[in-house]
Amino acid sequence: VLEGGFKDKPGKHRDYYHTCYCLSGLSVCQHSESKAVGDSPKPTSVLGPFSNLLEPIHPLFNVILDRYYEAHDFFSRM
C-alpha cells in the first residue's frame, strides 16, 4: 500500500509515476545552481532541513548521476 507520494490532480490516487517525476524535478531544482558535479547545493535551494536534499539526477535520463556514469562507461567500451 502506498502510504505517501504524489498524485496527478485532486481526486486522483497517489502513484509511483507522479511521485518519481515530482521528486526528479525537485532534485533538478535543488542542484541547478551547482557549479560542478559533486558540489553541494546552496542552502537556499533546499526547503526545510538539509536532510530534505535529494540525490542529483541526470535530467535527461532520470537516473541518479552515479548510475548514469556507470552506464556511460560501460556502453562507451562497446
Image (spheres, rainbow, N blue to C red):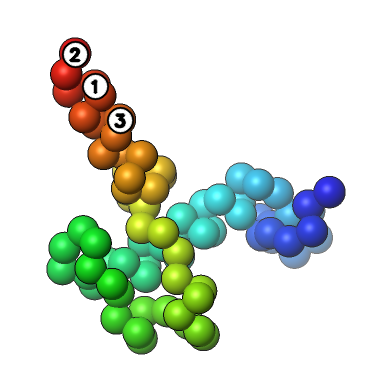
Disc 2, disc 3: CB below 8 Å?
no
The quarter of the picture where residue 41 lies is bottom left
In the rendered structure, the answer to whether residue 21 lies left or right of residue 31 reads: right
- Which residue is denoted by mark 1 in the rendering? 75
Label 2 crowd bin: few (<14), some (14–19), many (20+), radius 10 Å: few
Q: CA distance from mark 3 to mark 1?
A: 6 Å
At label 1, the amino acid type is Phe
Residue 12 seen in the figure: no
- Which residue is denoted by mark 2 in the rendering? 78
**Element type at mark 1:** helix
Disc 3, disc 1: CB below 8 Å?
yes
* Sequence order check, earlier mark of 2 and 3: 3
What x and y, as percent, mark residue 59? Answer: 33, 50
Residue at position x 26%, y 39% in the image: 69
Label 3 crowd bin: few (<14), some (14–19), many (20+), radius 10 Å: few
Residue at position x 53%, y 59% in the image: 22
Q: CA distance from mark 2 to mark 1?
A: 5 Å
Q: CA distance from mark 2 to mark 3?
A: 11 Å
What x and y, as percent, mark residue 64? Answer: 39, 48
**Element type at mark 2:** loop
Please state which of residues 54 and 12 is positioned toward the viewer in this rendering: 54
Residue at position x 40%, y 43% in the image: 63
What x and y, as percent, mark residue 1? Answer: 84, 49
Disc 2, disc 1: CB below 8 Å?
yes
- Which residue is denoted by mark 3 in the rendering? 71
In the rendered structure, the answer to whether residue 6 lies left or right of residue 34 reads: right
Residue 19 seen in the figure: yes
**Element type at mark 3:** helix
What x and y, as percent, mark residue 13? Answer: 78, 53
At label 3, the amino acid type is Ala
Label 1 crowd bin: few (<14), some (14–19), many (20+), radius 10 Å: few
